[in-house]
Image: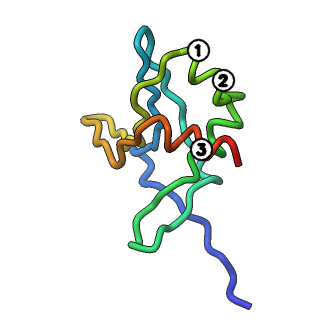
């Protein structure tokens, strides 16, 4: 059986999920324990895991008027948007 190796980011990097709403922006830090390697060999995370850990539901997102959801890589110098999702895609993930 192949042993899974732990995925870690560079010490000066972090991944964030940014929920952009009509009146507020919410930034959530992704736990390193939730990171996975996607089929393209890039670090990714199951977004619904981080949202659920922070008790964010589809209802909450609708109340906040979320218009965009982004997976962002943060360093001390810059912010890089890795993925930009339509809120409907994320809402579907939360329904599963």
Cα distance in 3D space between marks 2 and 3: 12 Å
Going from the N terminus, do you reach mark 2 or mark 3 first? 2
Name the spot of residue 90 as percent of width and height, x first: 53, 41
Cα distance in 3D space between marks 3 and 1: 16 Å
Q: Is residue 49 left or right of residue 82?
A: right
Q: Are marks 1 and 2 in contact (CB under 8 Å)?
A: yes
Q: Which residue is mark 1?
A: 63
| Residue at the image point whose x is 68% and y is 29% from the top | 57
Q: Which residue is mark 2?
A: 59
Res 48 label: none
Name the spot of residue 21 as percent of width and height, x first: 43, 18
Q: Which residue is mark 3?
A: 92
Provide the secondary structure element on which disc 1 rests: helix
Query: Between residues 59 and 38, which one lies in front from this camera angle?
Result: 59
Query: Between residues 49 and 79, which one lies in front from this camera angle?
Result: 49
Which quarter shows the N terminus?
bottom right
Q: Is residue 78 left or right of residue 35?
A: left
Name the spot of residue 36 as percent of width and height, x first: 55, 63
Relative vertical location of residue 61 with respect to residue 75 in this rendering, above or below: above
Provide the secondary structure element on which disc 3 rests: helix
| Residue at the image point whose x is 46% and y is 27% from the top | 19
Q: Residues within 10 Å of mark 3 (few under 14, many from 20)?
A: few
Q: Residues within 10 Å of mark 1 (few under 14, many from 20)?
A: few
Cα distance in 3D space between marks 1 and 2: 6 Å
| Residue at the image point whose x is 42% and y is 54% from the top | 10
Provide the secondary structure element on which disc 2 rests: helix
| Residue at the image point whose x is 45% and y is 49% from the top | 11
């Amino acid at each position: 059986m192949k042993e899974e190796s732990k995925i870690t980011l560079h010490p000066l990097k972090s991944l964030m999920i940014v929920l952009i709403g009509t009146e507020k922006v919410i930034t959530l830090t992704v736990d390193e324990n939730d990171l996975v390697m996607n089929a393209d060999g890039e670090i990714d995370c199951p977004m619904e895991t981080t949202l659920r850990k922070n008790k964010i539901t589809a209802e909450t997102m609708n109340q906040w008027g979320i218009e965009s959801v982004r997976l962002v890589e943060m360093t001390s110098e810059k912010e890089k948007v890795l993925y930009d999702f339509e809120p409907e895609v994320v809402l579907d993930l939360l329904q599963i």
